[in-house]
Image (cartoon, rainbow, N blue to C red):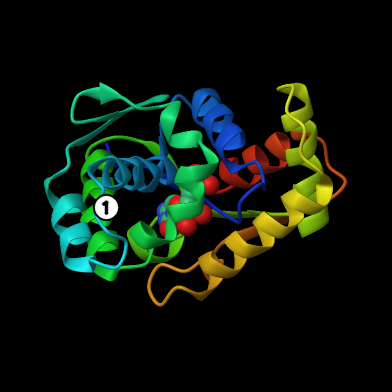
Amino acid sequence: STRMIVTIDGPAGAGKSSIAREVAAELGYAFLDTGAMYRAITLGAMRRGIPWNDVDALVRYAQEARLSWNEDRIDLDDEDVSSEIRTPEVTANIRYIADPPEIRDCLTMQQRRIAEGRDLVTEGRDQGTEVFPEAECKVFLTASPEERARRRQQQLIAEGKQVTFEEILIAQNQRDLEDRMRPVGRLRAALDAVVIQTDGMNSQQVKQSVLDSVRSCV
Ligand code: C5P
């Protein structure tokens, strides 16, 4: 049987992870969160104290680190780092790992290997453009900066954390800029992606709309 690849790309805070996970479950496909891979390498480089300006050492580290992904869990050298990769410190340093093209190549190869022989919903920034340009079905999930920051704030409030809307928006704008400007693998919609603008939609409606567009191509 021929395998199906569904890519879901978009900016931070567009709700890609939860939607991609639910869509994968609905279709019975595997699910891959590629941001978790960039996060895990960032965490490992921080732990080793590799200087962020030593790109050669960062590339070497990315090539030797052993990542393994299993649905909701990511292991770095056999240690479950799934929660530790979500800290603001990791997020703040991620560009040092996501920018160098050699590190992106290394993670791109691993993502393609994970996809071998299976149906997959994969989520990130460059999945439809760089990693799986031949994917059968591509979605670009987006929302205005204010809408994404509002959702993020609600999520943080639910977790009992106090952050102002302004703080969230500033950090998010910074990450948007970094993600859109990097020379390779930058955030953009593939020409053949279905763009879903989710302002004013609830998560149920977003999920339904992604499922509709996926079902029209699978
Ligand atoms: O999706 P998430 O917020 O976990 O991704 C963290 C960061 O990893 C992104 O802001 C981006 O800089 C980087 N990333 C990337 N390419 C991907 C996925 C994530 O450069 N495919």
Q: Is residue 33 above or below residue 168?
A: above
Q: Is residue 190 visible?
A: yes
* Badge 1 amino acid: Leu
Answer with the quarter of the image where residue 211 lies. Answer: top right
Q: Position of residue 138 (x, y in %)?
A: 52, 55
Question: Quarter holding the N terminus?
Answer: top left
Q: Position of residue 73 (x, y in %)?
A: 37, 24
Q: Position of residue 54 (x, y in %)?
A: 23, 66
Q: Is residue 158 above or below residue 104?
A: above
- Label 1 Cα neighbours within 10 Å, binned few <14 / some 14-19 / many ≥20: many
Question: Circle 1 sits on which residue?
Answer: 107
Q: Is mark 1 within 8 Å of ligand 1?
A: yes
Q: Residue at x 51, y 36 (%)?
A: 87
The answer to which of 104 and 201 lies nearer the viewer is 104
Q: Residue at x 72, y 59 (%)?
A: 170
In the image: residue 22, left or right of residue 173 = left
Q: Residue at x 27, y 47 (%)?
A: 45
Answer with the quarter of the image where residue 206 lies. Answer: top right
Q: Tag 1, which secondary structure?
A: helix
